[in-house]
């Protein structure tokens, strides 16, 4: 999260290491090109005797409810700010002191999850507090219950989440396998774990998740395949409020103070906690091979990148090389980021990577990576080639639209339901814009409109922000965001957290095609089926998703798997690979539905 800079020559040290590491990467991370061990055989059209939609969904926990098709709108892409109508009234407090303390500029996250099991997505918003002086108990994070149709009630007090502290990120997972999603909140100074009692309330518990670092993004995953959800917590830099804070820039011919960047501070160790069963954890950072004292982690994605059936871990680091921890299958990881081609940009430079998201943007059956960075560096898009990754930031069109902004929370989502993943980014500066002026407020100095890019279906992205609604003309200091269908109308909505500003709810009202959203339910402790993979075929198009932990920045997205279907009026086939490797096929599924799928009993 450094100051913007012009492109420089690649360090020879990194280039030499990159060339030398390719062979190692093939051995540790890759597999023969074209062979996809986790990808099922190409799907064929459903036979004439395919079961009816009702029969195909017969093992679901409840009947699927038909939803109306999308209505016409000014654009295929159109988002409306419905914050006022939603009932959410949340203001992020960054503890601004006027002395430019580093945590002030980082913001906070959002978690979308169904905490009370009523089928609607609820919204948890992380808040900061004062950085100097005592914590103000009236400044709190907030839980908003979805009353239906994306209208919300603040239930923070009633739910037992009325805590105060300088929060940063949040992640969701059922740590003890009791059927109720728990909540972990990271922060500057302290991280907290809240156990979901299953009656609409939470209780803070000590479960072995001791973390003395400056917590950022976090994610649940089952890295050892034992059916219990483990937890990875990113820590940022080593920092305290009594460290030197001074940095100055010239605005309007005057010297003014500004925020320092990560280069001013040493790195920090992120933590991997193994679930011992029953919802208690032990720190296995060293024994699992993920101990890295120089990391400056901000974004996190826990995904099986190479299709070997084991969850890997990608860490987006700020101004140092990104990490890709390859799961060796014996409880340990090997760091292969440089060899795999994701540690640095295509020209060999580490970037100021913020958040990260994963998605198969070209529908080739492989999960790709996107990481926003500071302005003038251009955001990174890494294409998964099956053995290594290629930086396609320029050839995809991403670089042409992102060189003038600083991004934080990236989101792959099919926002127009055409069967191809688009991209959304929250944006906001970390160093004052030269045009801000010495006497300008924070919005003028750091505010930037967010960005929406449409997938043109041939591997390129086009900026459609200018025609996607008035919101995209508004300059804010965007940080965390979460994507999910808040009103179950088949269109992916957004909830955005702005540093020192209001949380906003964007309703997706764009036109587009048909859709289906799958809610998977497995057996055992990992009932949410974290790590499951889904291949869907409809209208001659094949798409791939993995239900994974992490994604975005400091935030947790809707766990349901959304697929845009374009003009297809029937889903020919869905193949599911459950976390334990078992496969299951459903055929002839209806479209425009929220469809729960329970794993079939043997």
Image (cartoon, rainbow, N blue to C red):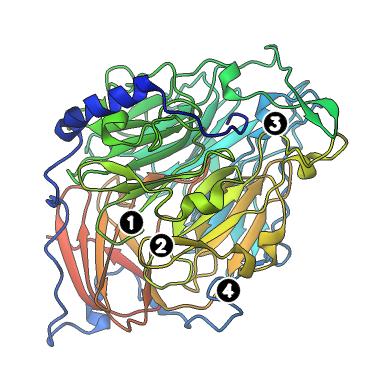
Q: Secondary structure at mark 3?
A: helix
Comparing labels 2 and 3, the label whose residue is closer to the camera: 2
**Quadrant for the C terminus in the image:** bottom left
Query: Who's the residue at 69% across and 41% down the image?
Result: 499
Crowding around mark 3 (Cα neighbors within 10 Å: few <14, some 14 to 19, many 20+) is many
* CA–CA distance in space, label 1 to label 3: 34 Å
Q: Which residue is mark 3?
A: 104
Q: Is residue 14 above or below residue 37?
A: above
Sequence-earlier tag: 4 or 3? 3
- Contact (CB < 8 A) between labels 4 and 3? no
Q: Which residue is mark 4?
A: 509
Q: Which residue is mark 2?
A: 421
Which image quarter: residue 74? bottom right
Query: Who's the residue at 74% across and 17% down the image?
Result: 246
- Provide residue 219's location: percent of width, then percent of height: 42, 39
- Provide residue 554's location: percent of width, then percent of height: 53, 40
Comparing labels 1 and 3, the label whose residue is closer to the camera: 1
Query: Who's the residue at 65% across and 41% down the image?
Result: 141
* CA–CA distance in space, label 1 to label 4: 24 Å
Comparing labels 4 and 2, the label whose residue is closer to the camera: 2
- Provide residue 489's location: percent of width, then percent of height: 50, 74
Crowding around mark 1 (Cα neighbors within 10 Å: few <14, some 14 to 19, many 20+) is many
Sequence-earlier tag: 1 or 3? 3
Residue 360: numbered disc: 1
* CA–CA distance in space, label 4 to label 2: 17 Å
- Contact (CB < 8 A) between labels 2 and 1? yes
Query: Who's the residue at 19% across and 44% down the image?
Result: 309
* CA–CA distance in space, label 2 to label 1: 7 Å
Sequence-earlier tag: 4 or 2? 2
């Amino acid at each position: 999260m450094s100051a913007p800079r012009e492109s420089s020559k690649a360090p020879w040290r990194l280039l030499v290491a990159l060339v030398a590491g390719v062979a190692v990467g093939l051995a540790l991370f890759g597999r023969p090109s074209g062979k996809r061990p986790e990808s099922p055989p190409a799907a064929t059209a459903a036979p004439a005797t395919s079961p009816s939609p009702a029969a195909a969904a017969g093992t679901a926990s409840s009947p699927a409810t038909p939803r109306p098709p999308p209505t016409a709108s000014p654009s295929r892409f159109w988002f409306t700010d419905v914050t006022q109508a939603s009932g959410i009234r949340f203001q992020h407090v960054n503890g601004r002191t006027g002395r430019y303390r580093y945590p002030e500029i980082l913001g906070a996250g959002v978690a979308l999850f169904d905490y009370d099991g009523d089928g609607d997505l609820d919204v948890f918003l992380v808040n900061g507090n004062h950085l100097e002086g005592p914590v103000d108990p009236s400044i709190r994070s907030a839980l908003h219950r979805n009353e239906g149709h994306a209208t919300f009630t603040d239930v923070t007090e009633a739910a037992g989440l009325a805590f105060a502290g300088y929060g940063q990120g949040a992640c969701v997972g059922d740590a003890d396998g009791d059927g109720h999603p728990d909540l972990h909140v990271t922060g500057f100074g302290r991280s907290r774990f809240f156990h979901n009692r299953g009656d609409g309330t939470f209780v803070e518990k000590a479960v072995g998740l001791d973390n003395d670092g400056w917590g950022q993004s976090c994610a649940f995953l089952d890295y050892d395949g034992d059916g219990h959800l483990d937890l990875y917590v990113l820590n940022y830099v080593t920092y305290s409020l009594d460290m030197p804070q001074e940095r100055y820039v010239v605005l309007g011919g005057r010297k003014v103070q500004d925020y320092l960047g990560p280069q001013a501070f040493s790195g920090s160790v992120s933590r991997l906690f193994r679930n011992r069963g029953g919802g208690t954890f032990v720190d296995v950072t060293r024994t699992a091979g993920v101990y890295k004292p120089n990391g400056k982690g901000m974004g996190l994605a826990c995904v099986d990148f190479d299709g070997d059936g084991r969850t890997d871990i990608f860490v987006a680091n700020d101004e140092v090389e990104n990490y890709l921890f390859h799961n060796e299958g014996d409880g340990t990881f090997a760091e292969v980021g440089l060899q795999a081609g994701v540690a640095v940009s295509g020209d060999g430079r580490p970037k100021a990577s913020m958040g990260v998201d994963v998605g198969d943007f070209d529908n080739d059956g492989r999960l790709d990576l996107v990481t926003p960075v500071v302005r003038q560096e251009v955001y990174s898009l890494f294409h998964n080639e099956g053995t290594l990754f290629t930086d396609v930031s320029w050839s995809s069109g991403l670089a042409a639209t992102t060189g003038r902004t600083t991004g934080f929370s990236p989101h792959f989502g099919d926002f127009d339901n055409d069967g191809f993943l688009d991209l959304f980014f929250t944006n906001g500066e970390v160093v004052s814009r030269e045009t801000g002026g010495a006497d300008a407020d924070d919005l003028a100095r750091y505010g930037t409109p967010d960005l929406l890019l449409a997938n043109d279906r041939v591997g390129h992205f086009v900026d459609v922000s200018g025609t996607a609604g008035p919101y995209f003309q508004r300059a804010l200091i965007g940080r965390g965001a979460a994507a999910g269908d808040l009103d179950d109308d088949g269109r992916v909505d957004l909830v955005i957290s702005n540093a020192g500003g209001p949380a906003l709810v964007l309703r997706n009202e764009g036109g587009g095609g048909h859709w289906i959203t799958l809610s998977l339910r497995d057996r055992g402790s990992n009932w949410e089926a974290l790590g499951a993979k889904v291949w869907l075929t409809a209208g001659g198009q094949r798409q791939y998703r993995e239900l994974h932990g992490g994604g975005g920045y400091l935030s947790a997205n809707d766990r349901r798997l959304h697929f845009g279907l374009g003009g297809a009026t029937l889903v020919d086939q869905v193949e599911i690979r459950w976390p334990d490797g078992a496969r299951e096929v459903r055929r002839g599924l209806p479209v425009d539905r929220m469809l729960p799928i329970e794993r079939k009993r043997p």
